[in-house]
Image (tube, grey):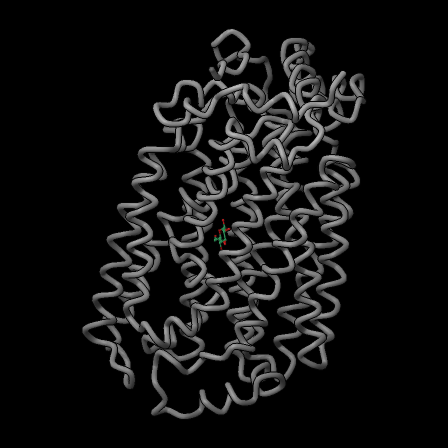
């Protein structure tokens, strides 16, 4: 008969600690990893709608774009154009597994430093690109940067934060993603009028935050968990005192040491992840990321300029509307920072599903009824679409956006944390790749139906959140196993049966 996994007494502990200036500094520097990710997301849509860029690398798409009678929904459909955008995500998917190993062995900080070096090389290749190969290769290297940064930064933030503020601090990652997307939108708006090399400026400016991440990361600390896991207990404890701003860290220190000792017994984290007791965090982490992408957010983030041109804006107005949605994205992420440790994760996930479902259905209906393959929406209707897109982005920004990164970073026990998180990151990247690669073709074939497609997914993820995602607000990261044992569905997996062959025999 399966036995229940040993607990630390049933109650979730509370540890001393406040937020110190040093922690804020570390959070801001690390979150620049998110900025770079966001910048990459936001920049490609604008660049791929710039005529100078298309003429230089995708002359056929440029030609097609000139034909006014061309089908509205299909004028940008080009596999290579999509490959330019999406190659980054395949690279990031592969890199995240290597990054998980580096994160465990060397720590969170060196993983971020490696990420920044990838970013710098990738940016140089792209901005100096003279042929399509160089561009795609640059984007692949940037993808390695994203894989390493997205693996290390959210874990770093969750481990650094005191439990009661973990949500808010972790969401700084997402906040910086949204800053990055917005900044990319603004830069594209200006560089689209700089001929013929505006696109080079757009791609090259990512070098600035990459350099900042590299230099800044020299002054941040490693997380206490990662230090203690590497056997550097005294150093770990000293950092704990420094980041918690109190000398009373013994209970938290002991809980980390206990988590590290348990983790040391597991010789193969990936094998451990396949065991039943790892199923709850693994399934939730993977599905959260898949669902995050199937909200359809990146159809908007990558292709907003294209989408807004499709509904009838000129190219400048389309880029401007992209800036507006970007701004909404940033501000609404702020709401999430405020609410996540107060209202909790679940209420945000559920409320946003309702909001996103309604907006997707209404956008779909407007396009279905009024946007024919040729011609445009009338001015008023086009603006209504922009407003609906903003309401949709708002909902995503305070829920599935940040929580897609936060929840997977806090639900794994230490022994499977980096490995489990790699599955989350790679699921995100795989689905981001699929959307980036397929969206323009889907828009071309499904037309307005694509919005109903995403609405269907939103319904499914709402039900999943309702039934299967437990509330993790305020629970210390190394005490998370308690929540599975109390959950109506997941408790059946909390058995010890798998541990024997998986542990290092002592
Ligand atoms: C997602 C990205 C998305 C961004 C939008 C992130 O959490 O992972 O794919 O583009 O949010 O703000």
From the viewer's perspective, is 356 left or right of 486?
A: left
Q: Is residue 39 above or below residue 110?
A: below
Which quadrant is home to the C terminus?
top right
The residue that appears at 26% across and 75% down in the rendered structure is 379
Residue 397 percent across, percent down from the top left? 42, 47
Q: Residue at x 56, y 83 (%)?
A: 54
**Quarter holding residue 31:** top right
Q: Position of residue 14 (x, y in %)?
A: 53, 12
Q: How many marks?
A: 0
Q: Residue furthest front?
A: 1
State left or right for residue 420 relative to residue 213: left
Q: Quadrant of residue 232?
A: top right
The location of residue 354, given as percent across then percent down, is: 26, 46
Tell me the residue at 45%/68% (across/down).
438
Query: In which image quadrant can residue 413 be found?
Result: top right
Q: Is residue 287 above or below residue 190?
A: above
- Residue 429 in percent (x, y) is at 55, 54
Q: Is residue 12 above or below residue 299?
A: above
Write the residue at 58% across / 21% down: 478
Q: Is residue 308 left or right of residue 242?
A: left
């Amino acid at each position: 008969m399966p036995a229940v996994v040993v607990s630390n007494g049933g109650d979730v502990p509370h540890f001393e600690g406040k937020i110190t200036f040093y922690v804020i500094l570390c959070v801001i520097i690390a979150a620049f990893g998110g900025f770079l990710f966001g910048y990459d997301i936001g920049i490609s849509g604008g660049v791929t709608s710039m005529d100078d860029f298309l003429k230089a690398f995708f002359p056929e798409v440029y030609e097609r774009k000139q034909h006014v009678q061309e089908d509205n929904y299909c004028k940008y459909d080009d596999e290579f154009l999509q490959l330019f955008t999406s190659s980054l995500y395949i690279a990031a998917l592969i890199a995240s597994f290597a990054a998980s190993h580096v994160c465990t062995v060397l720590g969170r900080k060196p993983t971020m430093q490696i990420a920044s070096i990838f970013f710098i090389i990738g940016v140089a290749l792209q901005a100096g690109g003279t042929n399509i190969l160089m561009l795609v290769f640059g984007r692949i290297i940037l993808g390695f940067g994203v894989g390493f940064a997205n693996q290390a930064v959210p874990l770093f933030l969750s481990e650094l934060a005191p439990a009661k503020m973990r949500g808010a601090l972790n969401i700084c990652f997402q906040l910086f993603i949204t800053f990055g997307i917005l900044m990319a939108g603004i830069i594209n708006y200006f560089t689209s009028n700089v001929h013929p090399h505006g696109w080079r400026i757009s791609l090259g400016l990512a070098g600035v935050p990459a350099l900042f991440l590299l230099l800044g990361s020299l002054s941040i600390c490693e997380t206490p968990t990662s230090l203690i896991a590497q056997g550097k207990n005294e150093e770990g404890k000293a950092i704990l005192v420094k980041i918690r701003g109190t000398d009373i860290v013994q209970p938290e220190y002991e809980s980390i040491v206990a988590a590290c000792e348990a983790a040391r017994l597991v010789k193969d984290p990936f094998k451990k992840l396949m065991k039943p007791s790892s199923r709850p965090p693994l399934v939730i982490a993977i599905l959260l990321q898949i669902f995050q992408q199937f909200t359809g957010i990146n159809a908007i983030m990558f292709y907003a300029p294209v989408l807004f041109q499709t509904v009838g804006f000129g190219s400048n107005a389309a880029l401007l509307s992209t800036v507006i949605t970007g701004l909404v994205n940033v501000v609404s992420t702020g709401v999430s920072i405020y609410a996540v440790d107060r209202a909790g994760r679940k209420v945000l996930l559920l409320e946003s599903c309702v909001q996103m479902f309604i907006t997707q259905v209404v956008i779909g209906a407007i396009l279905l009824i009024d946007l024919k393959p040729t011609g445009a929406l009338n001015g008023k209707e086009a603006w209504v679409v922009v407003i609906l897109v903003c309401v949709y982005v708002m909902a995503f920004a305070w829920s599935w956006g940040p929580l897609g990164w936060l929840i997977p970073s806090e639900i794994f026990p230490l022994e499977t944390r980096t490995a489990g998180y790699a599955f989350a990151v790679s699921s995100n990247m795989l689905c981001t790749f699929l959307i980036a690669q397929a969206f323009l073709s889907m828009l071309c074939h499904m037309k307005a139906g694509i919005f109903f497609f995403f609405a269907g997914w939103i319904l499914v993820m709402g039900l999943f959140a309702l039934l299967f995602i437990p509330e993790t607000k305020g629970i210390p990261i190394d005490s998370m196993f308690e929540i599975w044992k109390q959950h109506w569905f997941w408790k059946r997996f909390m058995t010890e049966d798998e541990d024997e062959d998986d542990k290092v025999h002592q």
